[in-house]
């Protein structure tokens, strides 16, 4: 089967040799005393990808891979003063003074932070149909540990008949009878809270 698209995932991470002291017990956050501060999550493990209503064609699934992290990689964001949003950060060290604002805004609801990328589309050669990606980033702050889930939601847009023909071709290439339309791929990452500075 030919390659229909290639997925590239870029996470804002910091690689640093800096080590911080032990983290005490922390309830799920973000907390009011962390508003205005940069939160640092140490990435501990990229977990196996999760597929929901997606073709199991091997050459398609082989195009999606969990990101690889080096030792001491961090996900960072600054929680707004009112606690309703957070802004991604690019930092050179684990000191907030080394950080600059990124371009991803997270909405905060309880202990869950969510950000949505602008949709992207990939034209499919030979079809009057494109594959659309809607990407949702979700951080669940469980206190001392956290989880980042990056959801790739796929849909087909364009001429209805052409999209149905494409989806049938994709379904036929696998063994589970499912195509692209309505597929969701989740890229899960485990994290440990380091500090809010």
Image: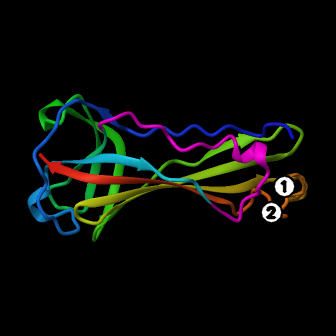
Report the residue marked by disc 2: 178
Q: Residue at x 28, y 60 (%)?
A: 145
Answer left or right for 55 relative to 104: right
In this picture, which residue range is highlighted in magenta? 51-72
Q: Quarter of the image holding residue 85?
A: bottom left
Answer left or right for 4 relative to 11: right
Report the residue marked by disc 1: 174
- The image shows residue 69 at horizontal and vertical percentages of 42, 37
**Does residue 54 belong to the magenta stretch?**
yes
| Location of residue 92 with respect to 190 vertically, above or below | above
| Location of residue 191 with respect to 90 vertically, above or below | below
Q: Residue at x 49, y 53 (%)?
A: 47
Foreground residue among 114 and 21: 21
Q: Nearer the viewer, mark 1 or mark 2?
A: 1
Q: Residue at x 89, y 58 (%)?
A: 168
Q: Quarter of the image holding residue 59?
A: top right
| Location of residue 19 with respect to 30 vertically, above or below | above
Foreground residue among 77 and 27: 27
**Dot 2 alpha-carbon crowd within 10 angstroms: few under 14, some 14 to 19, many 20 or more:** many
Image quarter hosting the N terminus: top right
Secondary element at tag 1: loop
Q: Residue at x 10, y 45 (%)?
A: 21
- The image shows residue 73 at horizontal and vertical percentages of 32, 38
**In this figure, which colouring scheme has been used for the structure?**
rainbow
The overriding secondary structure of the stretch rendered in magenta is loop
Answer left or right for 190 relative to 174: left
Tell me whether the residue at label 1 lies in contact with that at label 2, contact meaning CB atoms closer than 8 angstroms: yes
């Amino acid at each position: 089967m030919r390659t229909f698209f290639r997925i590239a995932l870029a996470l804002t991470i910091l690689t640093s040799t800096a080590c911080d002291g032990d983290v005490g017990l922390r309830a799920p956050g973000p907390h009011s005393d962390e508003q205005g501060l940069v939160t640092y999550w140490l990435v501990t493990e990229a977990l196996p990808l999760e597929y929901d209503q997606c073709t199991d064609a091997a050459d398609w699934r082989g195009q999606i891979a969990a990101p690889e992290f080096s030792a001491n990689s961090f996900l960072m964001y600054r929680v707004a003063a009112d606690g309703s949003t957070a802004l991604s950060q690019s930092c050179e060290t684990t000191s907030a003074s080394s950080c600059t604002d990124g371009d991803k805004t997270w909405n905060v609801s309880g202990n869950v932070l969510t950000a949505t990328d602008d949709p992207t589309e990939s034209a499919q050669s030979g079809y009057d149909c494109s594959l659309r990606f809607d990407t949702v980033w979700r951080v669940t702050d469980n206190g001392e540990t956290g989880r980042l889930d990056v959801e790739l939601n796929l849909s087909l847009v364009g001429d209805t008949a052409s999209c149905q023909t494409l989806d049938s071709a994709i379904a036929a290439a696998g063994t589970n009878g499912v195509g692209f339309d309505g597929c969701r791929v989740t890229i899960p990452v485990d994290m440990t809270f380091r500090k809010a500075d």
